[in-house]
């Protein structure tokens, strides 16, 4: 173990043999740190933080601190769970969950750029990228492969779908359907066609996703009517997942369509 002499580590912490811990790091409580992890100077792991292998925790990051919830009781036993191969850059904050036995979760192969904030009970899937100063309110869920632009803010209890891309300096209090490009305030501007190709989604599946997008946003039907119409069609896996997400949207609903093609992606174009 390569632990700087100025680090302060709780005796009950479980730390793999090859972990590197920099100057003035503080590790409190029953932290579990897997092999290959690097904890850089001045980082703080508060309470119970369970971390897999090959993670980087940047300078001054704070993981596992109490949630910013006025009703939270300090004696509540909750955690932060972090998977493998994640990069958590300098001054990120990831707060522990509010409920007994619950956890704030980060999947595998995620990249949280400097200043990202994950509030209590947030869950992000695998391969998620959050650019600088992205702000996630409590209970926000971000599905696999989503990209969050810098300075974007997300109201508590919303969900961002798989492979969605969010423009920087945007704000959302509604769910963002999978595969979409989201921007501004609670709007989507089209489909993430490039991301679909890079994810290996076949052309026929991409075309079905386009049809699903048009039915939801371009048919003149409201969301309930579009969902009812969608049940009359046998969709492939990805388009079916699109409508399943919409059907599961919470009471705030899904983002509206921004009538513009300034992002260079038009769901009416050929792929």
Image (tube, rainbow, N blue to C red):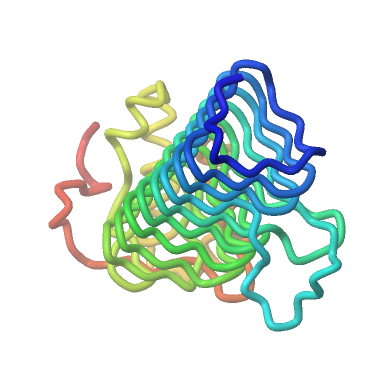
> Which residue reaches farthest top?
18
> Which residue reaches farthest front?
5
Quarter holding residue 138 = bottom right
At which x and y percent is residue 129?
40, 42
Q: Is residue 192 left or right of residue 102?
A: left
Task: Name which residue lies at 49% across and 38% down.
Answer: 57
- 226 shown above or below 238: below
Q: Is residue 170 left or right of residue 104?
A: left
> Which residue reaches farthest bottom?
70
Q: Nearer the viewer, residue 152 or 269?
A: 152
Q: Nearer the viewer, residue 20 or 143?
A: 20
- 89 shown above or below 70: above
Q: Nearer the viewer, residue 3 or 137?
A: 3
Is residue 260 visible in the rendered structure shown here? yes
At which x and y percent is residue 177?
47, 54
Task: Name which residue lies at 62% across and 59% down.
Answer: 95
Task: Name which residue lies at 66% across and 25% down.
Answer: 34
Q: Is residue 48 left or right of residue 228?
A: right
- The count of marks equals 0
Image quarter in which the C terminus is found: top left
Is residue 180 visible in the rendered structure shown here? no
Image quarter in which the N terminus is found: top right
At which x and y percent is residue 113?
36, 46
- 41 shown above or below 261: above
At which x and y percent is residue 83?
62, 32
């Amino acid at each position: 173990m390569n632990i700087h002499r100025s680090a302060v580590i709780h005796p009950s912490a479980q730390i793999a043999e090859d972990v590197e811990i920099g100057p003035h790091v503080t590790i409190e409580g029953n932290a579990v740190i897997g092999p290959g992890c690097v904890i850089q100077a001045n980082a703080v792991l508060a309470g119970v933080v369970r971390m897999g292998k090959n993670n980087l925790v940047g300078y001054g990051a704070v993981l596992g601190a109490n949630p910013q919830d006025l009703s939270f009781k300090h004696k509540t036993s909750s955690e932060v769970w972090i998977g493998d191969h994640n990069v958590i850059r300098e001054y990120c904050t990831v707060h522990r969950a509010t409920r007994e036995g619950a956890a704030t979760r980060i999947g595998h192969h995620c990249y949280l750029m400097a200043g990202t904030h994950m509030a209590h009970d947030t869950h992000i899937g695998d391969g998620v990228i959050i650019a600088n100063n992205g702000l996630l309110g409590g209970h926000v869920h971000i599905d696999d492969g989503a990209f969050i632009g810098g300075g974007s803010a997300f109201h508590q209890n919303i969900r961002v779908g798989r492979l969605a891309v969010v423009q920087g300096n945007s704000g959302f209090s509604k769910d963002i359907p999978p595969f979409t490009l989201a921007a501004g305030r609670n709007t989507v501007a089209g489909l993430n066609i490039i991301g679909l190709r890079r994810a290996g989604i076949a052309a026929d599946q991409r075309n079905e996703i386009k049809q699903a997008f048009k039915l939801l946003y371009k048919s003149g039907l409201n969301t309930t009517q579009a969902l009812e119409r969608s049940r009359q069609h046998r969709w492939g896996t990805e388009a079916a997942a699109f409508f399943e997400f919409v059907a599961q949207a919470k009471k705030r609903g899904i983002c509206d369509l921004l009538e513009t093609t300034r992002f260079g992606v038009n769901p009416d174009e050929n792929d």
